[in-house]
Amino acid sequence: MSKAAAIDIAAVSKIYGTMTAVHAISLKIPAGSYCCLLGPSGCGKSTTLRMIAGHERISSGDIRLGNTVVTDLPPARRGTAMMFQSYALFPHLDVVDNVAFSLKMKGVAKEERRARALDLLKLVQMDTYADRRPAQLSGGQQQRVALARALITDPEALLLDEPLSALDPFLKVRVRAELKKLQNELGITFVHVTHSQEEAMALADLIVVMNEGRIEQAAHPRTIFERPATAFVARFMGDHNVISGRVADVRDGAVTVEVAGGGRFDALGRPPEGGQADIAVRTDRVRLGEAPVPGLGFTGIVTNVEYRGASVKLTASGAGIEDFTAIVGDGPFFARPVTVGEAVPFAWRAEDAIVLGRLGS
């Protein structure tokens, strides 16, 4: 079970009548990696996963799994296995027969298929439940059975469609750790669809952020966090403020952006074409109560204070910026607390503000 295949998506589109759900996306997923397709509802991530699996026909483009073009192959001949959001276990079969079902359909002898099923149940720590029916299992246990059932076909890539969405928050954290451990043990390629930024950051070697059927950015989680490629990625991941305005000055690898309310802000990078630019400021690098250097801060009115335990989230407006966020450690905050309605200086360093790109530019 150590085999793994790279997945190469080349200019793949999906069109339903007059609506384009996926716009000619291209993506290379390395063999043996854990890839998360991340984005809001309707962004095309599940459609992309189903096209990889063969459950959705491709309108144009090609998909290659390893050395094989699988574009026109049926799901059973692709070398992939899919775990659906609804586990769809057979209620009248016990756990071991649920896992062994696909081998039964292939004509594998009962003793052999049950032995193989028990090996996989042991892998997902469900062998002691082999004789139970699905109704006697918790949601997390059913998920493990569904995972074993997907793996029994010995796939080169496992495709997971929002596999943690039905679990409670505590169980989600536990199961995602088990998924990562399992992927490391098996060494096969995992492609996992999720709308949870936290889930993607915890699991993935490669995060693919999608929006309106297009790929906004595909990169390692740290790159996504540290260097969002577009305003959408910066906003969706939630760790950057986005300030939009017209380009007022360009010099020495830096850009000055002027917002409608009159504020002027500096950022590192080159401006996109068109005279407008978005800059991103890290929420956790914003400092309170410190007179800002021109272009690297402003004075805003605090509109919300949210205690989060180890940190405090503040929201403020000022200098033409709405809903600017600062994440402050609980120690520094409570040493000098601020309240809603208070005017507070917000400042940051030059290296914590970057110019964002624009999709297609």
Image (spheres, helix red, strand yellow):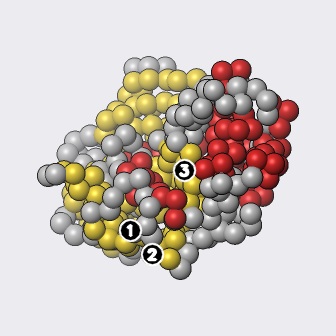
Q: Position of residue 41 (x, y in %)?
A: 37, 40
Q: Are marks 3 and 1 in contact (CB under 8 Å)?
A: no
User: Could you tell me which secondary element the residue under label 2 belongs to?
Assistant: strand
Quadrant location of the C terminus?
bottom left
Q: Could you tell me which residue is drawn at 66 percent across and 21 percent down? A: 135
Q: Position of residue 312 (x, y in %)?
A: 58, 29
| N-term mark: 3 or 1 | 1
Q: Is residue 116 left or right of residue 203?
A: right
Q: Name the residue nearer the viewer: 277 or 142.
A: 142
Q: Position of residue 122 (x, y in %)?
A: 83, 44
Of the residues tagged 2 and 1, which is closer to the observer?
1
* Residue matched to label 3: 82
Measured in 3D between alpha carbons, the distance from the residue under mark 3 to the one under mark 1, in whole angstroms, is 17 Å
Q: Quadrant of residue 270?
A: bottom left
Outermost residue, right side:
128
Amino acid type assigned to the residue bearing label 1 in the image = Asp
* Residue matched to label 1: 72
Amino acid type assigned to the residue bearing label 3 in the image = Met
Q: Residues within 10 Å of mark 1 (few under 14, many from 20)?
A: few
Outermost residue, bottom side:
67
| N-term mark: 3 or 2 | 2
Q: Could you tell me which residue is drawn at 74 percent across and 66 percent down? A: 2
Q: Is residue 301 left or right of residue 288?
A: left
Q: Are marks 2 and 1 in contact (CB under 8 Å)?
A: yes
Q: Position of residue 339 (x, y in %)?
A: 49, 20
Q: Is residue 173 left or right of residue 219?
A: right
